[in-house]
Amino acid sequence: MATKTTWVIDPTHSEVQFKVKHLVISTVTGSFKSFEGSVETESEDFDGATVSFSADTASIDTNMEQRDGHLKSADFFDAENYPKLTFTGILVKTGDDTFSLKGDLTVKNITKPFELKAEYGGNMTDFYGNNKSGFELSGKINRKEFGLEWSAVTEAGGVVVGDEVKLIANVQVVKQ
């Protein structure tokens, strides 16, 4: 019988970002500054590991206070009523250092299947004896499928915010 090992995200060495088109001509990058997650595995190579993750929607940061306020409002994340977005899934090995992370993403109480590509960066012991592993994850969603429906068109006919949102996370997990 295999032993379960728990790993937790090290927030000081991890980042969770998103990218979305603005006016269809450029990309705005944002991040969630407060998040947590864990990985439970029964194997050394993470194949079949269960993953859980949550981010505080009020921690959204696009480097512009006015835009962040709008994103926290009912037009988008409605952070007051929906303080967290969550993901739970299973990590499945697809190559030497590649995985598929399939599961359920919940935003504003709307849950949809979601898949991320994951690239394993390796394993290392830090200066303090902590066993750490790193992953780079990427995927994309249609924001409107999760109730993030605010939209506007400029006088010239340009869409203010694109529907497709790219998600990028670089995470370091620490063996417990």
Image (spheres, rainbow, N blue to C red):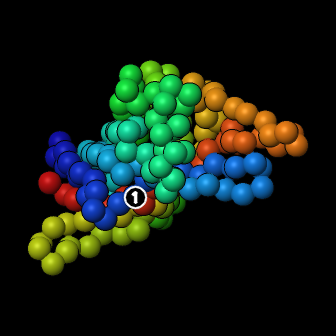
> Is 28 left or right of 61, judged from the image as shown?
right
Q: Which quadrant of the structure image shows residue 82?
A: top left
Q: Quadrant of the N terminus?
A: top left
Q: Is residue 155 left or right of residue 63?
A: right
Count of residue discs: 1
111, 39: nearer the viewer: 111
Q: Disc 1 residue type? A: Glu
- Residue placed at 19% from the left, 66% from the top? 131
At x 12%, y 72%, the residue is 129
Q: Local crowd at mark 1 within 10 Å, few (<14), some, or many (≥20)?
A: some
Q: Position of residue 63 (x, y in %)?
A: 49, 57
> 11 or 117, which is in the foreground?
11
Between 66 and 58, the one lying in front of the other is 66
Residue named by callout 1: 15
Residue 150 appears in the rendering = yes
Image quarter where the C terminus lies is bottom left
Q: Residue at x 64, y 35 (%)?
A: 142
Residue 124's x, y, as percent? 26, 73
